Amino acid sequence: EMVQMRVSESWRELYMIGTDELPDPMSGIPGVSSLFPVQNPLSNSQIEQYITTAESYSGFSDERAAIMRKALSYVGKVAYYYGAPDPDYGVSDCSAFISKALGISRVSTATFTTYPSTSNPVPGDLLVRYGVDGKSNHVMMFLGYNASGQMVVVHCSSNSDVQGVGVVAISDSYASDFKFVSINNVMEHNSYE
């Protein structure tokens, strides 16, 4: 517990994360800052804004709401480190973050590709990205679409859009490299923590 607190505090100091809200320069994405790539943690009311929006999708359920709440609770609190096993220690990679949000034992990004795809994503579903080599290299959680029609996701990344767990809007061209996977399929085939 002490290690977890120190990792979290050091990471917060390094990236100047405070508890004050920053302005929201990205329409429809609460808590995103353009000042630096790390996002402030989301307040409960900001998390509930995502849930309220998601409730308009057919097939959205209380289980999906709980999964989204868990995933969004890590925004601004977890740094990215490849291979890190658990976001509860303040560091994670994309598959550990998604596994934890789903409440399942950790699985690799490649494992998520083995599940059937869905063409009608519902908030809480996953997006698995394929690299130029055809192998999966990233997994994110779909939150819906913003007012501009861009796909909004929460993920754990080391990219320039966010360092650690954050919410971003992605372009259609970027999203075309992804496969949507229904969390229903994932949940049926995994053990729970």
Image: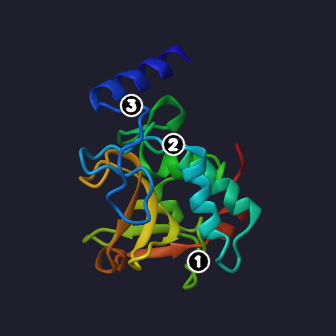
- Name the front one of labels 1 and 2: 2
Provide residue 183's location: percent of width, then percent of height. Answer: 63, 66
- Name the front one of labels 2 and 3: 3
| Residue 190 higher or lower than 55, as above or below | above
Going 34% across and 80% down the picture, which residue do you hit?
Answer: 172
Provide residue 169's location: percent of width, then percent of height. Answer: 37, 66
116 and 62: which is toward the camera: 62
Q: Is residue 49 left or right of residue 188?
A: left
Q: CA distance from mark 3 to mark 1?
A: 41 Å
Disc 2 element: loop
Disc 3 element: loop
| Residue 190 higher or lower than 119, as above or below | above
Determine crowd level at label 3: few under 14, some 14-19, many 20+ residues with C-alpha closer than 10 A. Answer: few
Quarter of the image that includes the N terminus: top right
The residue carrying mark 3 is 18
Q: How has the structure been colored for display?
A: rainbow
Q: Quadrant of residue 48?
A: bottom right
- Mark on residue 116? 1
Q: CA distance from mark 2 to mark 3?
A: 15 Å
Q: Mark 3 or mark 1, which has the lower sequence index?
A: 3
The residue carrying mark 2 is 74
Q: Answer whether residue 8 is visible to the viewer in this image.
A: yes
Q: Are marks 1 and 2 in contact (CB under 8 Å)?
A: no
Q: Mark 2 or mark 3, which has the lower sequence index?
A: 3
Label 3 sits on what residue type?
Gly
